Each structure stands twice: as C-alpha cells, then as structure tokens.
Amino acid sequence: MNHTPLAYSEIRRELLAGKYTCVEVVQGHLAQISLCNDQLNAFLTVYAEEALLRAAEIDVKIKEGNAGPLAGLVVGIKDLLCYADHPSQAGSQILNGFKSTFSATAVQRLLDADAIIIGRQNCDEFGMGSTNENSSFGPVLNYANPSHVAGGSSGGSAVAVQAGMCQVSLGTDTGGSIRMPAAFCGIMGLKPTYGRVSRWGLIAYASSFDTIGPMGHHVDDLALVLQTIEGKDGYDSTLMEDVASTYVSNKRVAYIKEIVEHPSLQVEIRDAFFEQVTQMKNAGYEVISVDFPFIDQLLPTYYVLTTAEASSNLARFDGVKFGYRTNDASDLMDMYKKTRDEAFGEEVKRRIMLGTFVLSADYYDAYYTKAQQVRRLIQERTLDVLSTCDFIVSPTTSSTAYKLGEKTLDPLQMYLGDLFTVQANITGLPALSIPMGVDSSGLPMGFQITGRAFDEQGLFEFAKSIER
C-alpha cells in the first residue's frame, strides 16, 4: 500500500527504450481501478476504451519518434474541469446529463502533449467541502484506511493517485482543495500562483480564488505538468504575462507562531513539523518564527468572499439551458426555485445563501467590503514576511484524515479544517503540500510550503532539498 510508483521521467525512458508500451501502462492503471474503485469511489467515469485507443496511437508516435513531452502520462481529471464531449457535473445533480462542448485549457494542453486521460474524478459538489462527503455521488474513501475521508474537495483526484489508479491528477484549489487531500492521502499537491494557469473550462466556485493544479507522487511530475498547462491562452484575462521565476535562495524560512501553537493542531503533526524544522536547520537553513496578527480573520475573510462569489457564479444553474430541470413547476419562477432546491446539495445551498446575504444592500459594507479590506491586510503582512524569507512553512492540516461522518454534523468544525491552507488562496501565492510521514494510526501527515508569487520553481527546489 505504501509503494511509491516510478516518476514519469523513468516511465518515459522505459517507453522510449521499448521496454513496455503505453497500452501496457494504461492496462496497469485500469487493473488498479477495477481492483479499488468500487470501494474507494474515486472515479465517477472511467474512459477505459478511449484511453487504450489513445495509448495505441501514442505508441505509434513513439515508434515514429514524434511523441509529445507527456507521452504515456496517465492523468485523471477532477469533475470540475470541462473535457469536450464528456460529462462534467461538478459533483452535482444540477448538471446531470450535461456534456461539455469544449475542453478546459489545462486539459487541452495535456492532450496536446500526448497525456492520456483515464477518467473523471469525484469531488465535493462545486468544490465546496473539505472531506469529499459533499459529493452527490457519495464520499471518497482514503486508501490508507477506508473508514476515513480522503479530504476535499479534490478527494477523488488524491485517492486515484494514492492508490495507483493514475500517475497524476488535475485538481482545483479554492481554499486548500488540492493540498488538504494531498496531505490526507500522503501525496504531493500544488496550488499554483493565481494567474499562472488559465481557469477557462473550470466550473467556477469563487473566481478570485480558484486555481487548477497537479497532484502526484513526485516533485518532477508536478513541475512537468505545471510547465505544460501554464501560460496565456486568450480566454482568461486574469493570467499574468510573464511568469518567469526569479528564485534566489538566501536559505531563510519562516513559520507562523500562531499556527504551530493553535489549539486545533494534533500533537503528532506538531512534533513531526518541528522534526522537519530541525532537519532544515541541520541542512543550513535559518528558520525563524514570525507573528501573524490576522489568524482569527483568515477563515471569516475567506468564507465571506468565496460565498459571495459562489452566490453570483452559481446563479446560472437554473434549469433553463442545460442540466437538471424539475418536472413539477407551475410557472417560470417556480421552475427556478424547485430546480435549484431539488438538485443542489445542502452545503451548496448553505454557501449560496450566506453569499447572497453578505451581498445584500443592508449588509454589503459590513461584510463584503470589510472582508476585501482585511484580505488586503492579510496579503500585505504575508508579503512582508516573504520579503525577508524565501518560504513560509506550516503543517498542511491541523489533523490527519477524519473518520467518515465525524465533521458532517457541524459545518463550523468542517470549516476550521481549512485554517492552514486558505492563506495562500486569499493572497494568491503558490503553495505545495508534501508528505510528512504518518501518525500512530498510520494516517498520512502533510508539510506545506508557501512561496513568493510565480516562484513555483523555488518551491520545487526546496521540496527536493527537504526530501533529500
């Protein structure tokens, strides 16, 4: 269960040498899917025939010497990403029956590089959740211990990699949705800098927070996928023109005192984190503790702004043009109300209502405007720390994976799980979660590194130095 598969560079070397074929690689993953997926519920649809046909085509390209840079890389995609002529449901019944007419830029770029998409992966509905229990298709279970959750919202994407059902997954991260499940499943997950990867074809939750990023077992695999999917495309006006890294290490790293002293932090995770800090010091890094006066404001700021954006983004799902429509409506307004009531899950309704409330005329300034101002303060303080340090490090999550059903009755407890990850989304900075061993129950723990804008290369180099 704990074997780490080969990095893509090694697989590619064997493919080019003719040791085995892309078809055999895909067959290996399909065998693992048929072994695990019924229990774990990671994939919603498996494109078995299509993946094998594509693998055969890429085998021909390899023989002819003109295969793309990701030839034979087997990828799963989160159900929030559009893939032409395939279902995209955002883990929701409101998009039941919907097939996308185009592919997300990130998905298309993988295909253009000869990656093979093996299926679409389960997720919390519209990316709203930290445990993958909010999916209308049922929860995803953790391969390390199936009585525990996978983390969310990219839980299916994490478990698929964890269990060897694909080499890499493409997930999305709005408040920790790549990094949290990566930590819970003992793999790596990157949330890139906001504006590095096009959001075109990502079914939106909160547009100023959403990012698309890779999940896998190896730093080099994440770097290769990022290099393939990043850059301008003409469809997303928030993309930055120049994303070249200017990484120069002065070997100075910070951790936030209020996070490592937080009462919610599991003792074993705290101990493992400080063990990691000791190893960094032994490797020549200066590690300093810094104060962060806005810890208590992180979650309220995040939830006020994301629910407001969700309320606006999800207004388009009304039963008129696509997806689910109620069978029991007396007039147009009744059709809107019943369609949304019947097809949205409880958590999605909760966030739409919260967002509509904070955007209402009487409360707009008290909540939404105030949260935007606090977002700026959080950003300024974070950048202040990163002006003298290369990275901010922390545990990725406050605990290891919860038991199934443990947090579902209390949404506030669930929201607290995002405390360590939302800072990177509020500030738009890149953050990487890497494995940090397991606790006494054998459940994985995660170590999070946050860097300067567009310094993903620095994150990768630092993660490798930690691995060594």
Image (cartoon, rainbow, N blue to C red):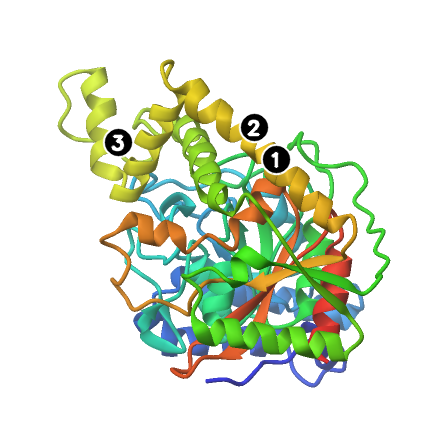
Q: Quadrant of residue 237?
A: top right
Q: CA distance from mark 1 to mark 2?
A: 7 Å
- The secondary element bearing badge 3 is classed as helix
Label drawn at residue 240: none
Circle 1 residue: 377
Q: Position of residue 303 (x, y in %)?
A: 43, 38
380 vs 91: above or below: above
Residue type, mark 2 in image: Gln
- The secondary element bearing badge 1 is classed as helix
Q: Position of residue 346 (x, y in %)?
A: 25, 42
The reply to whether dot 1 and dot 2 touch (C-beta < 8 Å) is yes
Camera-nearest residue between 228 and 440: 440
Q: Position of residue 215 (x, y in %)?
A: 57, 63
Circle 2 residue: 373
Q: Is residue 339 left or right of residue 125?
A: left
Residue type, mark 3 in image: Arg
Circle 3 residue: 340
Q: Quadrant of residue 373?
A: top right
Residue type, mark 1 in image: Leu
The numbered mark, 3 or 1, whose residue comes first in the sequence reads 3
Quadrant of the image containing the C terminus? bottom right
Mark 3 or mark 1, which is nearer to you? 1
